[in-house]
Image (cartoon, rainbow, N blue to C red):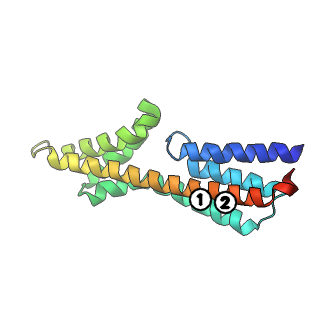
Amino acid sequence: MVEILIFGAAVLFILLGLAGSVLPIIPGPLSSWVGILLLHLTQGVPFDWTIVLVAGGAAVLIFVLDLVMPVLGTKKYGGSKASIRGCTIGIILGIIVLGPLGLIVGPFLGALVGELIAKGFKKSGSSSIKVGFGALVGFVVGTFFKVLFCLGLLMFFITISVKNWHTLF
């Protein structure tokens, strides 16, 4: 009975992770990793701790990169230090004020406002919009890697669960 509960929780965390790879409020990679960890803790699905540890390290790395990618996108599109700070502040304030939507809108608006402030509102806003777009591109790239990682863990989960189905139940 305990095995079924652990396996059920593992399934829920894998699915939660997949949802979290596109819903910013849920830490997708970390949730998927918890699903893999729980699967490993069942008696019926043997696989090496190395897989759990490597997947955990990758989940943390992707989680951090997802937070950093909007800032890197801002920098790549020519953002000043003010726009990079604005992007970072936009991520934080965006989450607080707008919830999940803030992770999309916050970096864009933060980088845009930061760049406009850095230029003293003297030049046209088109280059500032470009910098804000860079923050958005960074967000999309981060989301892509989260989805890819969570799908990979889902495929591993399904493959190893099917292979060991007879020992699970």
Q: Do the residues labelled 2 and 1 touch (CB within 8 Å)?
A: yes
Residue at label 1?
A: 152
Res. 119 visible in picture: no
Q: Which x, y percent locates residue 1?
A: 90, 43
Label 1 secondary element = helix
Question: How many marks can you see?
Answer: 2
Q: Which x, y percent locates residue 152?
A: 59, 59
Say which of 118 and 76 sits in front.
76
Which residue lies at the image location 60% right of the left edge and 47% below the top edge? 17
Name which residue type carries label 2: Phe
Side (left or right) of 125 relative to 21:
left
Residue at label 2?
A: 156
Side (left or right) of 165 relative to 139:
right
Name above or below for residue 120 compared with residue 99.
Answer: below
Crowding around mark 2 (Cα neighbors within 10 Å: few <14, some 14 to 19, many 20+) is few
Q: Which x, y percent locates residue 36?
A: 70, 55
